[in-house]
Amino acid sequence: MLQLSVLRDQTELVLAGLAKRHYPTGPADVAAILDLDQRRRQLQTSHDSAQAEANELARQIGGLMKAGDKAGAETLKARTAELKQHTQTAAAELAQVEKDQQQLLYKLPNIPHASVPEGRGAADNEVVREHGTKPTLGSDALPHWDLIKKYDIIDFELGVKITGAGFPVYKNQGARLQRALVNFFLDQARDAGYTEMQPPILVNEASGYGTGQLPDKEGQMYHDAKDDLYLIPTAEVPLTNIYRDEIVPVEKLPVRMAGYTPCFRREAGSWGADVRGLNRLHQFDKVEIVQITEPEHSYAALEGMLSHVEGLLQQLGLPYRVLRLCGGDMGFTSALTYDLEVWSAAQGRWLEVSSVSNFETYQANRLKCRYKVDGKTQLLHTLNGSALALPRIVAALLENNQTSAGIELPQVLHGYCGFERIGA
C-alpha cells in the first residue's frame, strides 16, 4: 500500500508511476484519496480541539463546585455535553472517512521503479539476457503431455476423477522427480543462507491483505467461506506475514527465508497449447525465497535473488532468458520484477518459471513491518522470488532431454532421484 505521505508530497511522481502502469483511474483515485485525507485531518483537528476544551472545562467545573458556584458549573456542564456530542459525531465520521480512504488505498498498485520499461503487455517486456543453447530435437520429438503418457509418470485423467481439471496425480518416477526437485531447490536455498520454513497453506484475511493478494486477487484464490480462510497462491503470503505487525531488530536484518508449499490458483485458464499439460495448473509445487531488508540494500538483494534463481537453471542445464517486466505487465504489488523463462524445445516457446520482485515499502506498509533507525520507526522493504515453480521446469526437462532411450536427467538430480533416466 502506498504511503499517504508519498501521495501528498510526491503526487506528480505517483501519477506518473500509475500512468506507466496504464492504470486507468489513477488521477481520480489519487484525487479522492487526497480529498479524504484533507477531510480526515480537518475532522481530527476538530475532534482533538473539542476534546481539549472539554478536558479544560472539566477542570474548571471542579473548581467552581469547590467554590460553591453551582450555576456556573451547570453552564459549563451544558457546554461539556455539547462538546461530547461533537466529539462522538466527529469520531464516527472520522472512522468512516478513514475506512473509505483505506479502501481506496488498497486499490492503488505500487509505483514502478525508474528502471521499469514503458509498455502495455508481455510483448513490451525487456529481454535482459539469454543463457544456454536451445536443444535441437528430432522430427519424432514429443511435447511433455505425450511424454508423460508414454512413461506413465503423471495422470491428468485420474486428477479429474478425484478433484477436477488442473489437479494432476504424480506417480512412479514422476512423483520421485517432484520430490527430488523440491529437495534440490531447498538445499540450494539453505546453502545460499536462507532459513528453511514450513508455513501453513491456509491463511486468514489479514494475511491476504498484508501481502496484497486481497482485494486485488480475491477471485483467483480458493476460499473456505465457513472459516474465512484462503488457500495460498504462493508461500510468499505466509512467509512474509510472519513479520506482520513486527519491529525487526536491525541486527536480524536481512531476514532470509525459503519455504516449499503446494500452491493453489483458480485461474488455470482455458483451452489451447498455452495451458495444456503442465503449462498451467490449479495446484502445483513451488519453493519460494523471501527477503526483508533495509531500503538501501533491497536492490542489491534483488540482484542476488535473481542470480540465485539463474544458478538453479544453469545447474539443471535449461536454456533460459531474463526479462524485466514493463509497467503494464507488472504484478499489482511490485516495484520491479524480473521474470525467468526456460526454453521448451518440443513446444518451441518460452515458459515462465520464476518471478523475482522487489516490493519496496508497499507490502511493509500494509503489514506494518518496520525497524528502527536512530530511534525512529521506518518501513522495511520486502522481496520474493520463485526458486523454483515445478510444473514448467518438469515440462522443459522432459522435452529438452528426451532421447530414444528415455528422458536423461541432469546430473545434479541423480542423487536426489535415485535414478538417472526416466524410462529406464
Image: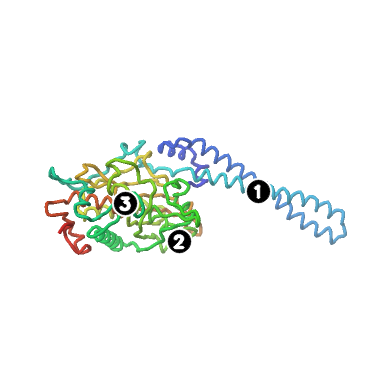
Query: How far across and down, in percent of the image, does residue 318 sit?
Result: 21, 50
The residue that disc 3 covers is: 303
> For this view, does 211 lie left or right of residue 95?
left
**Mark 2: amino acid:** Val
Q: Which residue is mark 1?
A: 92
- Disc 3 marks a residue whose amino acid type is Glu
Which residue is at a point 74% across and 49% down the rendered structure image? 83
Which one is in front, 13 or 145? 145
Q: Secondary structure at mark 3?
A: helix
- Residue 401 lies left or right of residue 17; in this view the side is left
The mark nearer the N terminus, 3 or 2, is 2
Q: Residue furthest front?
A: 161
The image position of residue 421, as x and y in percent, is 16, 58
Q: CA distance from mark 2 to mark 1?
A: 34 Å
Residue depth check, mark 2 versus mark 1: number of the one nearer the observer: 1
Q: Nearer the viewer, mark 1 or mark 3?
A: 1
- Tag of residue 296: none
| Image position, residue 205 (x, y; %) | 49, 54
Of mark 1 and mark 3, the one earlier in the sequence is 1
Percent x, y of residue 60: 79, 56
The image's colouring method is rainbow
Which residue is under mark 2?
Answer: 248
Q: Mark 2 or mark 1: which comes first in sequence?
A: 1
Number of other residues with Cα within 10 Å of mark 3, as a class: few under 14, some 14 to 19, many 20 or more: some
Give the quadrant of the C terminus. bottom left
Instruction: Tell me if mark 2 has few (under 14), some (14-19) or many (20+) residues whose alpha carbon lies within 10 angstroms of its own.
Output: some
Q: Decide which of 402, 100 is in the foreground and name it.
A: 402
Q: Nearer the viewer, residue 257 or 69?
A: 257
Q: Secondary structure at mark 1?
A: helix
